Image (tube, rainbow, N blue to C red):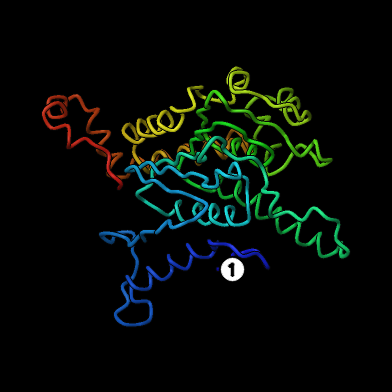
């Protein structure tokens, strides 16, 4: 299937999710003209499509509301091929519209998370037509950076379960996660420095200073040295460091606790506000967004149930009928 990038063949297409969404709406509401049903704020339910996540270089393990997304090219240390990047972008576009997914755990099969760009997809001999290669290189850069853009747009929290190497683009993807659980073997570095490129790529210069501070970000991005899990944890890059064999389960447990203790809509709105604060939005604009989001969340079924749960008059009922006071996807 031809992906969204001219001249690049990929197993996934950036337009696939949009096409599936439009087709599903057309089927549900008969947009072709036979008995059109209008969409209303007050209709009983909306049709939200169910997506298939059938990939080759990506594995999706649905554990209830927690989706474990794994880069699936262990033989190449999960280095970013065109194929893998197309599938990852396709997944990120689809999953943000998937109401069943509450939290994403991102990891890599085998010993490493992501060892940068896959050199098998990179021409290493100087071309005769530099104009063409500049165009193609720009398209490749877009494909790489779109992964980070789509991670930012994804409304569900993304927890990185990271072990082994995170080099170059793997470093940037690690930085774009909302939280990180590191395996003891985790090491990351700005690998492009050692081949004459810059140390900043795919949003690394945006995220890393905000995570570890400017001076430490400079040390990481201006130095091709590898930085290990314990030092990165000391610098605030990671939420936890665990044994490699436990890294995915620790991240899934964290994700499950978040799902159990929060309302789905409220969790998405919380991420939205935190992401806005990273963009340098003014203090007052952040407060306005918080106010808006509180009003939106308060008027959901979960918000009304939560208020009822706090009401002292319902204390005994909460104890006797806990199932009435569970969060729902509404």
| Residue 225 placement (x, y as % from top left) | 74, 26
Q: Name which residue lies at 45% across and 28% down.
A: 245
> Residue visible at 38% across and 77% down?
31
* Residue 19 screen position, x and y as percent: 47, 68
* Quarter of the image with the N terminus in it: bottom right
Which residue is found at the position 50% from the left and 22% from the top?
A: 240
**Up-down: is 105 above or below 228?**
below
* Residue shown at the point (44%, 33%) measured from the top left: 248
Q: Is residue 292 visible?
A: no
* Vertical relation: 228 (above or below) 116: above
As rendered, which of 224 and 222 lies closer to the eye?
A: 224
Along the line of sight, the residue nearer the viewer: 132 or 34: 132
Q: Which residue is denoted by mark 1 in the rendering?
A: 2
Most extreme residue toward the front is 75
Total marks shown come to: 1
- 319 on left or right of 102: left
Quarter of the rendering containing residue 111: top right
Residue 160 drawn at (x, y percent): 51, 35
Relative to 328, 60 lies left or right: right
> Residue 121: where, in percent of width, then height?
69, 55
Mark 1 element type: loop
Q: In the picture, residue 229 is in which quadrant? A: top right
**Within the image, what quadrant is residue 43 found in?**
bottom left
Sort mark 1 into few (<14), some (14-19) or many (20+) by Cα contacts within 10 Å.
some
Question: Is any part of residue 228 visible from this angle?
Answer: yes
Q: Residue furthest bottom?
A: 33
């Amino acid at each position: 299937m031809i992906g969204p990038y001219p001249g690049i063949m990929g197993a996934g297409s950036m337009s696939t999710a949009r096409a599936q969404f439009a087709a599903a709406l057309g089927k549900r509401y008969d947009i072709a003209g036979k008995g059109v049903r209008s969409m209303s704020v007050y209709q009983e339910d909306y049709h939200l499509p169910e997506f298939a996540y059938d990939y080759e270089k990506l594995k999706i393990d649905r554990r209830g509301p927690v989706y474990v997304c794994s880069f699936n090219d262990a033989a190449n240390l999960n280095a970013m091929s065109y194929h893998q990047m197309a599938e990852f972008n396709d997944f990120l576009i689809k999953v943000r519209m998937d109401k069943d997914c509450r939290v994403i755990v991102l990891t890599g099969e085998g010993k490493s998370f992501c060892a940068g760009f896959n050199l098998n997809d990179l021409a290493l001999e100087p071309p005769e037509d530099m104009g063409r290669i500049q165009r193609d290189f720009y398209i490749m850069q877009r494909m790489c950076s779109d992964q980070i853009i789509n991670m930012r747009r994804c409304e569900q929290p993304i927890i990185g379960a990271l072990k082994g190497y995170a080099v170059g683009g793997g470093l940037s993807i690690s930085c774009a996660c909302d939280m990180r659980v590191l395996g003891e073997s985790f090491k990351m570095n700005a690998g492009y420095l050692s081949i004459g490129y810059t140390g900043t790529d795919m949003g690394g210069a945006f995220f890393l200073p905000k995570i570890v501070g400017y001076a430490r970000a400079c040390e990481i991005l201006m130095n091709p040295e590898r930085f290990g899990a314990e030092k990165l944890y000391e610098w605030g890059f990671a939420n936890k460091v665990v044994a490699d064999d436990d890294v995915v389960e620790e991240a899934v447990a964290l994700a499950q606790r978040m799902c159990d203790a929060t309302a789905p809509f409220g969790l998405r709105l919380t991420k939205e506000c935190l992401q806005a604060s990273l963009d340098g939005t003014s203090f007052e604009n952040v407060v306005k967004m918080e106010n808006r989001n509180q009003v939106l969340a308060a008027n959901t079924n979960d918000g009304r149930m939560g208020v009822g749960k706090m009401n002292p008059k319902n204390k005994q009922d909460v104890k006797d009928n806990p199932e009435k006071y569970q969060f729902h996807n509404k």
